[in-house]
Amino acid sequence: MSATTLPIPTDAGDLPGLLWLPEHREEPVPGLVVLQEIFGVSDYIQRRCADLAALGYAVLAPQLFARLDPPIVGIDDWEDAESWLGEAMTLTQQLPWERAEADAIAALGALRAHGAVDSERVGLLGFCYGGGLAFAAAASAAEEDRPPTTLVSYYGSALPSLLDRAGVVTMPSLHHFGTADDFIPPETVEQIRHAVTAGGTREQVRFELHEGAGHAFDNPHPFVHHAQASDAAWQQTVGFLAETLPLRA
């Protein structure tokens, strides 16, 4: 399934996005904004977007790194782990967090405004950098009384610094973490769990721990991939979306 380009209006000019629409749709469908890892809108992220579209969702991936000069979409072909991660971190640091959050919120608005999309049923899904960014965007959107319908965050790397905003992120949410994550240690994961579940009182928030998986375990790159965790997390994600963002209201 191929994507088309969709300009996303923002206060800093249009941002390019990639849009996947499900085939054979007869009515407006629920939508998902997918937010990238630090590696950009890579082939991997695009494949996940296509997977979601194949399920029946309209999917928009804003190309956040298009703000950079030169714009870089993805770096899936690095053979040296240190260089791979270093280049990605450098890219991320060049993009102010406030700018990325504003662009993510703009993407949410652009997808809601698309004629093929049910504007009342649009969610956020993010990986790594995008997992934290999705949480932040969900908080800002909730503060503006336009929260996303649902939120899925894979190992949100910025979540430890965003927990003061957990009080407004009350929509159905799913969080994935690996128990062998070198970037987010177990004690920090427990702090995140306590905050996002309001001490276990938010039944609409699910928290999944994947034994033996490290950071970015869903990425197929051999430096980080954990096949068992990837498969389990994806099935949990698909099931969660079927419950919280059903294809038919």
Image (cartoon, helix red, strand yellow):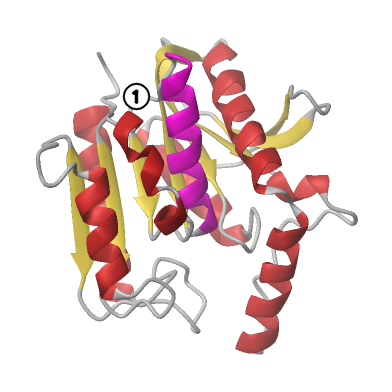
Residue shown at 64% from the left, 32% from the top: 102
Q: Which residue is mark 1?
A: 149
Write down the quadrant of residue 60 in the picture.
top right
Outermost residue on the front side: it is 164
Quadrant showing the C terminus: top left
Q: Position of residue 151 (x, y in %)?
A: 35, 37
Q: What's the amino acid at mark 1?
A: Thr
- 121 w.r.t. 35: above or below: above
- Relative to residue 248, is residue 224 depicted above or below? below
Residue 175 magenta-highlighted: no
- Judged left or right of residue 184, residue 177 is left
Residue 79 lies, in percent from the top left, at: 66, 87
Horizontal arrangement in the rendering, residue 192 relative to residue 182 (left or right)? left
Magenta residues, dominant SS class: helix
Q: Is residue 234 visible?
A: no
> Residue 107 at x, y = what percent?
61, 29
* Span colored in magenta: 129-145
Q: Is residue 15 visible?
A: yes
- Label 1 element class: loop
Q: Give residue 63's quadrant in the image.
A: top right
Q: Nearer the viewer, residue 21 or 164?
A: 164
Q: Residue at x 27, y 39 (%)?
A: 173
Choose between 43 and 107: the one closer to the eye: 107
Asked whether 143 falls inside the magenta stretch, the response is: yes
Residue at x 52%, y 16% (from the top left corner): 112
